Amino acid sequence: DTAVSQTPKYLVTQMGNDKSIKCEQNLGHDTMYWYKQDSKKFLKIMFSYNNKELIINETVPNRFSPKSPDKAHLNLHINSLELGDSAVYFCASSQDLATIQETQYFGPGTRLLVL
Amino acid sequence: GNSVTQMEGPVTLSEEAFLTINCTYTATGYPSLFWYVQYPGEGLQLLLKATKADDKGSNKGFEATYRKETTSFHLEKGSVQVSDSAVYFCALLTGNQFYFGTGTSLTVIP
């Protein structure tokens, strides 16, 4: 069974469209994250969500909005897609907020290409 | 601020060669340090970690020692295999947030 799953695996879309990426974890974790990995492999956190509180990274444009229907899901919705949004987006989860005891489990990634 | 700097890749080695991937960090407080590995088409997986100065993390033949005096956490392996081909990320954890390096791509050829 996949611990952290993401759909779709690949997403190709036109500039200006609105799209969503879904993430689900079956580990019973309370904390989930979204990371963006650019073409140079640089991995940067976008959001973390700890069951009760959404922590927003200030450098993320407000076109990006995470939505959590329950603690097992953290979806990423992107409005008005731009070319620079092309990247691989990784979802991750941990039992609680990141600490040395809390291993993060990553999903396989969603490869987004904006044309 | 907090940041991680890794050596530029890509790195190409022959099987059984010795591997070193350099990592240095800048952090406030006392961070924990990690190495993650990303195999082709997969997400990141924790490889090893260290919580305090002079700690050595090890796993699958890889080692890294937390050096506070040089703010470094270099990854080493004595004899690499083709299956070690992947992208390796150094990361630090402080204030409940991870900061990742840019990743170093390793290709091991038979």
Image (spheres, coloured by chain):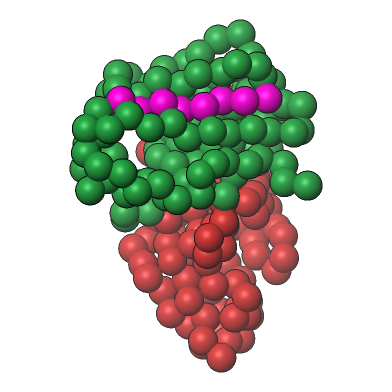
Magenta stretch: residue A75 in it?
yes
**In the displayed structure, would residue B103 be above or below residue A91?**
below
Q: Nearer the viewer, residue A112 or A92?
A: A112
In x, y percent, where is residue B58?
70, 58
Identify the residue shown where x is 51% and y is 86%: B109
The answer to whether residue A16 is seen in the rendering is yes
Say left or right for B49 vs A110: right
* Count of marks overlaid on the render: 0
**In the displayed structure, would residue B85 be above or below residue A108?**
below
**In the displayed structure, would residue B43 be above or below residue A48?**
below
In x, y percent, where is residue B6?
39, 55
What secondary structure predominates along the stretch shown in magenta? strand
Identify the residue shown where x is 61% and y is 8%: A52
Magenta stretch: residue B28 in it?
no
**In the displayed structure, would residue B29 be above or below residue A112?**
above
In x, y percent, where is residue A40?
31, 55
Identify the residue shown where x is 41% and y is 26%: A77
Q: Residue A103 appears in which quarter of the rendering? A: top right
Chain B visual colour = red
Identify the residue shown where x is 54% and y is 37%: A91
Q: Nearer the viewer, residue B40 or A10?
A: A10
Q: Residue A114 appears in which quarter of the rendering? A: top left
Q: Nearer the viewer, residue A115 or B95?
A: A115
Q: Residue furthest bottom?
A: B110
Say left or right for B55 vs A90: right
Q: Residue A63 appears in which quarter of the rendering? A: top left
The answer to whether residue A98 is seen in the rendering is no
Looking at the colours in the rendered structure, which chain would you say is drawn in green?
A
Q: Which residues are magenta?
A: A72-79
In x, y percent, where is residue B12?
43, 79
